[in-house]
Amino acid sequence: MDEIYNPLHLAICGGVWFTVLFWSRRNIEKGFCDPRISNAHSIGIILMSTTVVLELGIIPESLALSFTSCYFVVDMVDCILRKDFMFLFHAVISLALMLGSSLSPVHYKLHSYHKGMLTEGSTPMLNCWQKTKKKIHYIFFFALFTIFRIVWVPIFLSQTWPHVSDGSSYDRAVIYLGYVWYLLQLAWYVKMIGILINYKEEDEREKNGKTD
């Protein structure tokens, strides 16, 4: 198995994300929650994970793992500072899945975590909708969330299961944790369906403080 975590990659990615955290908390209204920061992580990890899953050999897998693991560590710190415990739970599960799958020879070979990170495909559209509150943007976000999180996750988990079902309890536990993460997505999805059915663009814009 290739080197999982290169110390240099960890140092660079950790330094960058912690710098972004401290700088954003002082200079940006939304701090580390700023959509530009979220988009930088989402788009970056989607591109890197895609190259890993397709085995294109463009970047070292250690760089992709360091990039996103350091992001979630910093995200956890930010959630604690903001006392946002729901998203802290999300960050903890995401980090646990990343560490659990990357440290497992079976999941590492299957690129399980990078397949899971493709779920970030819906995040940029979420940030777009949160900015505009336009119904059309919500519909696009809803569609992408459905594809990347509601449909894709059980597909790749079910494809992975035969490779670990007769293996170690550790490898199976990673899959179980993946389903816990999926249940969280389903809880959000139920709420999203209600928003879509009852969507009134004017009301959503007022909630966001927009009058134009």
Image (cartoon, grey):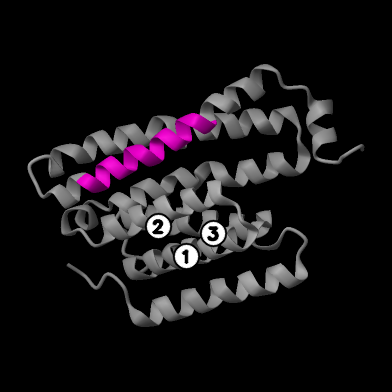
Q: Quadrant of the C terminus?
A: top right
- The earlier-in-sequence mark between 2 and 3 is 3
121 and 95: which is toward the camera: 95
As drawn, the label of residue 95 is: 2
Q: Nearer the viewer, mark 1 or mark 3?
A: 1
Which residue is drawn at the image coordinates 76% and 65% (left, top)? 28
Q: Secondary structure at mark 3?
A: helix
Q: Is residue 108 above or below residue 139?
A: below
- Where residue 182 sits in the image (x, y, percent)? 39, 36
Q: Is residue 78 above or below residue 6?
A: above
Q: Secondary structure at mark 2?
A: helix
- Where residue 177 sits in the image (x, y, percent)? 31, 44
Q: Is residue 169 above or below residue 157?
A: below
- Residue range (magenta): 173-188
Q: Which residue is mark 3?
A: 41
- CB of mark 1 within 8 Å of CB of mark 2? yes
Q: Which residue is mark 1?
A: 73
- Distance from the alpha carbon under mark 1 to that under mark 3: 13 Å
- The earlier-in-sequence mark between 1 and 3 is 3
- Where residue 26 sits in the image (x, y, percent)? 74, 72
- Distance from the alpha carbon under mark 1 to that under mark 2: 7 Å
> What's the magenta bit mostly, secondary-structure-wise?
helix
What kind of residue is marked 3? His
**Left or right side of 202 for 85:** left
Which residue is drawn at the image coordinates 78% and 22% (left, top)? 200
Which residue is drawn at the image coordinates 46% and 30% (left, top)? 186
**Classed neighbour count for the residue bearing mark 2: other residues with Cα under 10 Å, few (<14), some (14–19), many (≥20):** many
Which quadrant of the structure image shows residue 21? bottom right
- Distance from the alpha carbon under mark 2 to that under mark 3: 14 Å
Q: Quadrant of the N terminus?
A: bottom left
What kind of residue is marked 1? Val
